[in-house]
Amino acid sequence: MIKITLPDGSVREYEKGVTGYDVAMSISEGLARNVLSAKVNGEVWDATRPIEEDATVQLLTWNDDEGKSTFWHSSAHLLAEALEELYPGVKFGIGPPIANGFYYDIDLGERTLGEDDLPKIEQKMLELARNKNEFVRKDISKADAIKYFEEKGDEYKLELIDGLEDGKITFYEQGNFVDLCRGPHMPNTGFVKAVKLMNVAGAYWRGDEKRKQLTRIYGVSFPKQKELKEYLELLEEAKKRDHRKLGKELELFTFSEKVGMGLPLWLPKGTLLRERLENFLRKAQIKAGYEPVVTPHIGSKQLYVTSGHYDKYGEDSFQPIKTPNENEEFLLKPMNCPHHCEIYNSKPRSYKDLPVRFAEFGTVYRYEQSGELHGLTRVRGFTQDDAHIFCRPDQVKEEFVKVIDLVLYVFNALGFSDFTAQVSLRDPENKSKYIGKDELWDKAEREIQEAADERGLKTVRELGEAAFYGPKLDFMVKDALGRSWQLGTIQVDYNLPERFELEYTGSDNQKHRPVMIHRAPFGSLERFVAVLIEHCGGRFPLWLAPDQIAVLPISEKYQAYAEEVYAQLGESDIRGFIDNRDEKIGRKIRDAEVKKVPFMLIVGEKEQEEGKVSVRKHGEGDFGSLSVEDFIKQFKQESTLTDK
């Protein structure tokens, strides 16, 4: 017999070889019908895989992220099976689950696949799903795996096998389809009741532009048709909220091929939005004891060699800038932290001086592949609301907690209430990706978890997501459409102070190393604005809107009164414009609605005589007739950050 520990702490005994499905059946038949996979000692397994020793087991369903991942991974195999039936001879690259669905990279030889072919493939997938074929896991030797795919003539799978260790290779089979895969998969294909293949794209094999371009088919699947319908409705709403579409309509930003791909140009209204965000955070930072600094957009190559950024970003970033001096090389800065280390080093520091907090809205540059660029969410030049805290080891936890409070203040002000704090740790299987000693990493990881616990944050732990120099706390925020985004981040770093030989004189009159905390509540300002646009659908909080009001004179006769009203509003720091076009008032109102201006103030004969304005609120219609003074009072009540 073996002992199985369940998430509630209860322990049950089963015969050796019990499966996750068997455990579910022993609890309830209803649960067993919904189990997709099982997490065994922290690793996700097939629900039908035998458990041979004592273990902790969590049963995963569609309601769990890892359950969804299993469902979509299995759906990718179902897609491949359908393709093999419809297009004999097709070759397969990889077919993983992704955040919302799955994809498979395929090689159809001389044949091409278009959007018109997708409904036929969907129907074949559903037809195969109804067979309820089991996903069968088989251990296979490397020699037999090579032989199978040599006979099949699939060079992509052979290349994947080449990098695998003999004795750790598995195949999965369902129906007539066999694939190289480590799993896990759900019990059978019958769980899939609804499928939508979203689009077809090109993808270079293994992401290498010098290799063959394969056809990538993206899809999504669900256990109920109703859920697919709801998902597609959500996608339609997401299209309406797309920050690229709204950014153009609201005249916030643009891109130019002449300037360069991935380099946004901020238009006047977008610049106002950015400045408002920056000023909001600057004010909060000054209250919290931060000192502003400014550093150049480039730095000596040696600076980034010292920091380790050159080794980690060098090949994938912009290449060194040469100067007339052949011994001199500069880089566009990929991070602000090395510059801040040198500012710290500019004078001697005492233990009484710490903590020192430097803050900068610093623009950094990373060379992203052209195919990965996406509006403001993935760019080549972006501004970080970067700050670095240099503190004594005994101050780390207190400073970390203060940064958490600052991040929460930012999220609250901007309406982000649904988030998870992710403790991002090293990948213990691949420590070569990171710098620094194990004991310092262990200490930093403990301090982050303790600070998060002190603030009562709901946390998840993710291996392999740490920065190369230290673990971090990433804030995963859900927007109005339920999509998750990584926004704010806080990192504890014992390594850069070592590399830059940072010191302070302690109370014992000896030299000591400070600890460095990296933090960015917005993260990338560009990405933050993109997420904010989509979260609020372009209807920004009143305090943040670039244009808060539009004064709409009914005709040119009331232009002078409109200007008088506008000047009065300006004295109260209320921003906007006068629409003095020779257009009917209905057209002016419609245009202001499209631009999502929060308030429209209509002025005509009656308003001029009474010294009032007729107020319309975006999306709500008439708000009544008010004096300008009363409108200003009303405005300040709604502009929640007026007195912060």
Image: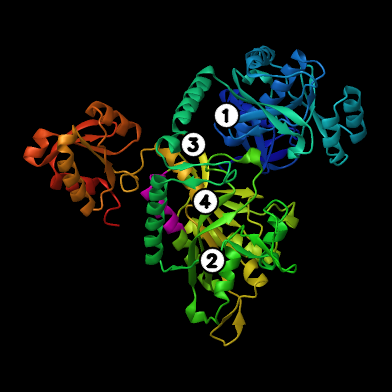
Q: Earlier in the sequence, mark 3 or mark 1?
A: 1
Q: Residue at x 65, y 75 (%)?
A: 501
**SS class, disc 3:** helix
For disc 1, the marked residue is 62
Q: Quadrant of residue 455?
A: bottom left
Figure label count: 4
Local packing at callout 1 (Cα closer than 10 Å; few below 14, some 14-19, many 20+) is some
Q: Nearer the viewer, residue 411 or 446?
A: 411
Tell me the residue at 53%/71% (across/down): 390
Label 3 to label 4, Cα distance in Å? 16 Å
User: Mark 4: which amino acid?
Assistant: Ser
Of the residues under marks 3 and 4, which one precedes in the sequence?
A: 3
Residue tagged 3: 244
N-terminal-most mark, 4 or 1: 1
Tell me: 478 left or right of 192: left
Relative side of 426 to 88, left or right:
left
Residue 524 numbered mark, or none: 4
Answer with mark 1 or mark 2, whichever residue precedes in sequence. 1
Tell me the element at label 4. Answer: loop
Q: Residue furthest left?
A: 609
On residue 295, which mark appears? 2
Q: Which residues are magenta?
A: 404-417
Residues marked 4 and 1 touching at CB (< 8 Å): no
Secondary structure character of the magenta stretch overall:
helix
Vertical position of residue 258 compared to residue 442: above or below: above
